Amino acid sequence: MVQDLTPSSGLVTFSNGEREKQIIISVQRDDTPEPAERFKIQLMSSTATGGAKVEGITEGVILIEDSDNMYGSVQFAGTDRQKLVVVSGILFD
């Protein structure tokens, strides 16, 4: 199974006095049709060490939109190849 996001977990280390840190998350491209997916990014205060505090917004959500062709596609033949079929008194196109 291919992961949609990498890394799936990690450690954020702050230097003394540092208040912000960029987290880089990559979305893996694939050709597999799939519905929209939500992923939660969470800073866990229970893992803070060295006197660090986790305050304020500690969660975020990444939304990967559904595939353009999630449910497949329907194509119709040209009018010269279309016909009506009657089975047991029921009309089908």
Image (cartoon, rainbow, N blue to C red):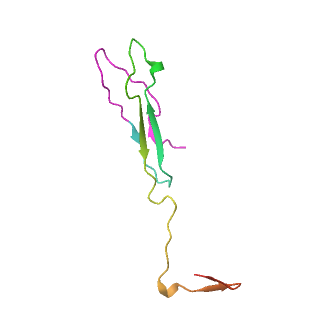
**Residue located at (47% from left, 60% from top):** 69
Q: Nearer the viewer, residue 23 or 56?
A: 56
In the figure, 31 relative to 53: above or below?
below
Q: Nearer the viewer, residue 58 or 62?
A: 58
Q: Is residue 18 magenta?
A: yes
For residue 11, which quarter of the picture?
Answer: top left
Instruction: Tell me: residue 93, above or below residue 12.
Output: below
Residue 44 lies, in percent from the top left, at 46, 24
Question: Residue 52's x, y, as percent?
Answer: 38, 15
Residue at 39% across, 37% down: 25
Residue 19 visible (yes or no): yes
Which residues fall within the magenta stretch?
Answer: 1-24
Q: Is residue 49 above or below residue 63?
A: above
User: Residue 62, percent across and down?
Assistant: 42, 41
Picture coordinates of residue 79 (x, y %)? 48, 85
Image quadrant where one finds the N terminus: top right
What is the residue that sits farthest to the right in this orientation? 88
